[in-house]
Image (cartoon, rainbow, N blue to C red):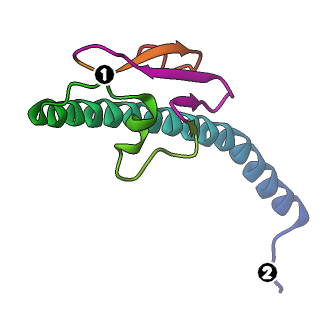
């Protein structure tokens, strides 16, 4: 007697795999979007820290000039991810968040306009 799977058993397994993949794929897509937002938030924090450090270095040297936006991007050792264009972050949905460098004694990164869900509170 030969032992093998029947056609109905194989179809049943394929249907179950299809249902599981239909549930799992959207979950992974949402996780990827959340990761991109988290990375963008971390890069904003790194920029703020780099600007504060550079500002302190300049004050110690007696240089009180403001830090420009183009200088701010160059302060990061590894630069910004490909989701950035200057100081504008493009989120997973295509919405953007534009940042600028405040010209005050503190010289920190401040929010301009932000349409990216998950970054609007920065």
Q: Which is nearer the N-term, disc 1 or disc 2?
A: 2
- Residue 85 is left or right of residue 109, and the answer is right
Instruction: Name the residue rendered at 59%, 34% in the picture.
Output: 30
Q: Quadrant of residue 29?
A: top right
**100 in magenta:** yes
Report the residue marked by disc 1.
Answer: 108
Query: In the rendered view, would you say 24 is above or below 7?
Result: above
Report the residue marked by disc 2.
Answer: 3
Query: In the rendered view, would you say 31 is above or below 94?
Result: below
Q: Which image quarter holds the N terminus? A: bottom right
- Residue 81 is left or right of residue 4, and the answer is left
Instruction: Name the residue rendered at 23%, 30% in the picture.
Output: 52
Instruction: Name the residue rendered at 65%, 23% in the picture.
Output: 95
Give whichever of 64, 35 is nearer the camera: 64
Q: Nearer the viewer, mark 1 or mark 2?
A: 1
User: Residue 117: x and y, percent?
Assistant: 55, 19
**Number of numbered discs visible in the structure rendering:** 2
User: Residue 7: x and y, percent?
Assistant: 90, 64
User: Residue 109: x and y, percent?
Assistant: 36, 23
Q: Are marks 1 and 2 in contact (CB under 8 Å)?
A: no
- Residue 49 is left or right of residue 89, and the answer is left
Instruction: Name the residue rendered at 21%, 30% in the picture.
Output: 55
User: Residue 4: x and y, percent?
Assistant: 81, 77
Near mark 1 (Cα within 10 A), the count class, few <14, some 14-19 or many ≥20, is many
Query: In the rendered view, would you say 107 is above or below 11?
Result: above
> From which residue to which does the magenta span run?
86-105
Mark 1 → mark 2, Cα distance in angstroms: 72 Å
- Give the secondary structure at mark 2: loop
């Amino acid at each position: 007697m030969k032992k093998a799977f029947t056609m109905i058993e194989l179809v049943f397994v394929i249907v179950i795999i299809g249902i599981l993949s239909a549930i799992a794929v959207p979950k992974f897509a949402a996780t990827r979007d959340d990761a991109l937002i988290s990375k963008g938030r971390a890069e904003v924090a790194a920029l703020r820290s780099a600007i504060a450090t550079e500002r302190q270095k300049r004050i110690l040297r007696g240089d009180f000039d403001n830090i420009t936006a183009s200088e701010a991007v160059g302060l990061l050792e590894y630069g910004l991810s490909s989701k950035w264009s200057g100081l504008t972050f493009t989120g997973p949905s295509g919405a953007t968040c534009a940042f600028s460098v405040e010209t005050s004694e503190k010289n920190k990164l401040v929010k301009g306009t932000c349409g990216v869900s998950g970054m609007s509170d920065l």
